[in-house]
Amino acid sequence: MAVAITKCLIDWGLDKVFTITVDNASSNDTTAKELSKQFSKWGTNFMDGSHIHVRCVAHIINLIVQDGLKKVGDPVKRVGQATRYIRQSPARIKRFKECCEIEKIESKKSLCLDVPTRWNSTYLMLNTTQEFENALQDMVLLILDCWIIFLIIIVKMESSLHFENAMDSDDLDLIFMAERMKAKFEKYWGVPEKMNKMIFVACVLDPRFKFEYVAFVLLSMYGEEKGGK
């Protein structure tokens, strides 16, 4: 892969590469190292390549969520199967709408399927199903609790606090999900030293946030001892 990418860079007339964003496949680790060597030969390897490899944040978020899903995978799968069954036939969709009228369900939403590579699509599927299928309500609400927590995590990036709150729950399934998700989170972002600082560059370049917001996020995530350094 490194050879192929190098050839493309040469064809495009590019010899200065600051970072490379890829998923967490082990082959990408090797690719990043080999490309770093090539850039060193060209004399364009910034900071000796220490920050060249940026792991895709969206991909890691999805890994965290999918890890949490393993505990409750079967219920989610059944919700998906039911949704798929209804959507596959115009006659079934028509009958489903008739059932909604009987139940006096006035929601304007449509049943939607999840996509394995998009964690938020699972949340949307469950959230929509909850409004239409009373028999699944208790099951969906359980999973939605964890998804709502995760939405807050993504928006506020106060991961440790919310994971710990979930683990203090009386619900054993929610505790198990939170523990798995926290373990996956800490694998990549557990301590500041593990993080590629380049992920903060976009925030620093945004005139609305600059360094102040980065400092706030680090303190929120890791506390004064680690985040304040």
Image: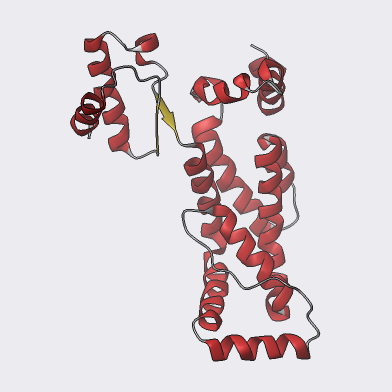
User: How are the residues colored?
Assistant: secondary structure
Quarter of the figure that contains the C terminus: top right
Image point (62%, 89%), residue name: 94
- In this rendering, is residue 43 above or below 143? above
- In this rendering, is residue 77 above or below 13? below
Expressed as whole percent of the image width and height from the top left, the position of residue 65 reads 55, 50
Q: Nearer the viewer, residue 84 or 158?
A: 84
Image point (27%, 16%), residue name: 39
Q: Is residue 173 left or right of residue 39?
A: right
Expressed as whole percent of the image width and height from the top left, the position of residue 75 reads 57, 70
Q: Which of 123 and 94 is in front in this view?
A: 94
Q: Nearer the viewer, residue 221 or 168?
A: 221
Determine which quarter of the picture holds residue 200.
Answer: top right
Determine which quarter of the picture holds residue 5.
Answer: top left
Image point (26%, 22%), residue name: 13
Q: Which of 71 and 117 is in front in this view?
A: 117
Determine which quarter of the picture holds residue 23.
Answer: top left
Instruction: Report the number of discs.
Output: 0
Quarter of the figure that contains the N terminus: top left
Expressed as whole percent of the image width and height from the top left, the position of residue 55 reads 44, 33
- In this rendering, is residue 103 above or below 45? below
Image point (73%, 85%), residue name: 100
Expressed as whole percent of the image width and height from the top left, the position of residue 72 reads 57, 63
